Amino acid sequence: MQKVSFFKSIHVKLVLIYILLILLALQIIGIYFARELEQNLKSNFRESIFQRVDLMQYSIREEMLKERDESMPTLEESLKTIVMEFSTGLKEVSNGDILEIRVIDNRQRIRATSEVDNQSLIGQRSNNDLVRRAISAETLFENIKLDNKTRNRVWVLASPIRNGVGPDDEIIGVLYIEANIESVFEQVNDINRIFLGGTAVSLVITIFLGILVARTITQPIADMRKQAQAMAKGNYSRKVRVYGTDEIGQLAITFNHLTNRLQEAQSTTEAERRKLDSVLSNMTDGVIATDRKGRIILINDPALELLHISRDITLGRPIASVLGIDQEYSFEDLIHMNDAVNLDFSTADAPYILRANFSVIQKETGFINGLITVLHDITEQEKIEMDRREFVSNVSHELRTPLTTMRSYLEALADGAWKDENIAPTFLNVTQTETERMIRLVNDLLQLSRMDSSDYELNKDIVLFNSFFNRIIDRFEMSKSDKVMFERLFSEASYYVEIDTDKVTQVIDNIISNAIKYSPDGGNIRFGFTAQGDMLKVMISDDGMGIPKENVGRIFERFYRVDRARARSMGGTGLGLAIAREMIEAHGGKIWAESEEGYGTTVFFTLPLNLDDFDEAGEWE
């Protein structure tokens, strides 16, 4: 997991937020405090002056309204005396901040000033805008201006002097006062500097406390982050430390509980996964799983073997393409497929058919997550089904033919043919022949049925195969016609086998009968046997018509005939070689044929030798 940078850390963010909140609070308090303090100091400064202004105005008004004679001081002198006395008193009250007091009449002429250097201005016209506005507006004006020389802020007051105490009395002059208010602002600045120092100290303490407070929050979160990283790697043994019982502590307890539950769920999931892997690996059926877009995400080994493909080229590919049905079906068609689909991979050499069953992976909400496909090899089932259908067809045909013949002859006899001494015996002979043919067919079927169900036993005896084989050949040689000749190609060595003589006799009888049946006039039938390891290999060969190469392997199938019309005309049931194969295999041997069309057929079969009585091997040329 990527490491969190310093400035993106929640610890730093919490500390910064804490500091910014404290700083914002201090700034708001500082601004409010400085503003109120400034207003308060300015108000006190003004109040200290206004307390004497009314008395000063009263004294000045009395002097200006008093009628004078020669014995009395002039108005200017009287006003100067008053101004100087009040200036001294105001300086004491305002800590010496009174700069100048002037008395100006209603014609804007300066009548008195407290400033010694400005005595020459007495009698001159005042051009002060504040004085002019106070006279014209008949109201008090005050302002703060900047002194051009000292660059200090000066508070200026222009208060009208009336000839009475009423608000409608006539303006007779203006009391003009200038006071140095810079000391007030200096006091505010001093207090602000003190406040800023306190703020800095508070911030240092706040940072320290913020780090501690943030640590109490971020430490459990950091522990949970480490635990989450460990859980991502599969380690569920680590636990988060619980630092308290607050919300963070409750979260840590819940996180530990979640870890335990996840560990249990992981164990259960892992166990189920192993079971699923075991089931999928040991299934004979192939299983394929797809995602919601039809791409393969899982395929087991049996499915790979059934499809004859590798895992690398299947994962991520569309399932319809892998199954080879993308031309007929889309993924949406497979989702709604209710019936199984047969996949025919048969070749000219061998049949190969798979059956695919489709099942949708669906959530409770109905959302389709994917598709499960189960593959099953039904080649043998299809072959068995084809054999069954062919078997039923053949049995039906084999039984219907003699029954049809018998019915025709019996109907003819019933219609009066039995009265004809020449025709009746022939008809009865045909009926008897067809009956015997059906009996042989039924007996062969019963024998095959018993062998299929293993409902029979072999009565084995140890016999000298040389004598046993010669006796069978002799029997056929005595009864055969002169159209074929027998040739024996085996040595005088003695071979003993443990066999059921009746069953093996039936096998050899059937093979020799077929050889005689299909051999041309003047043909030869050759007999031989030899030892090959612990098996006795027996050969019976003829010079008949032979069998096409593509049909040689099927002559041991039930009811199979290369030339059905000719075989049926010769009275065969099509079960002789099938019975021979079952009997030889029951003895632990094998039977097969080699043939070349037009040059004859050779049938081989093997029987286990009795090695205790075995003499020596023989060969045929």
Image: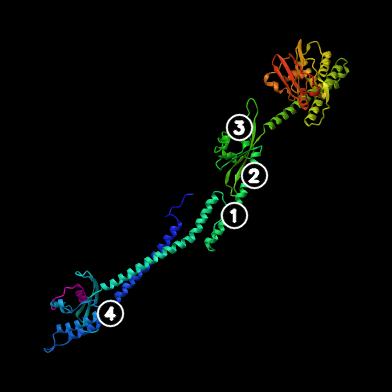
What residue appears at the point 71 percent right and 16 percent down from the top-left corner? 546
Of labels 2 and 1, the one closer to you: 1
Could you tell whether 161 is left or right of 193 in the image?
A: left
Could you tell whether 234 is left or right of 404 in the image?
A: left
In this view, 49 is above or below 360: below
Of labels 3 and 1, the one closer to you: 1
What residue appears at the point 80 percent right and 15 percent down from the top-left corner? 492
Q: Nearer the viewer, residue 440 or 519?
A: 519
Q: Which residues are magenta?
A: 122-136
Q: Pointer 1: what residue?
A: 260
Query: Dot 1 surroundings within 10 Å: few (below 14), some, or many (20 or more)?
Result: some
Could you tell whether 25 is left or right of 167 in the image?
A: right
Which sits earlier in the primary sequence, circle 3 or circle 1? 1
Q: Pointer 4: what residue?
A: 48
Where disc 1 sits, the SS reads: helix
Which sits earlier in the primary sequence, circle 4 or circle 1? 4
Q: Amino acid at mark 4?
A: Ser
Residue 22: numbered disc:
none
Which sits earlier in the primary sequence, circle 2 or circle 3? 2
Q: Amino acid at mark 3?
A: His
Q: Could you tell me how far apart the alpha carbons at marks 2 and 1 are, in whole angstroms?
A: 22 Å
Query: Dot 4 surroundings within 10 Å: few (below 14), some, or many (20 or more)?
Result: some
Which sits earlier in the primary sequence, circle 4 or circle 2? 4
Residue 308: numbered disc:
3
Q: Amino acid at mark 2?
A: Lys
Q: Amino acid at mark 1?
A: Asn
Q: Pointer 2: what residue?
A: 275
In this view, 489 is above or below 398: above
Where disc 4 sits, the SS reads: helix
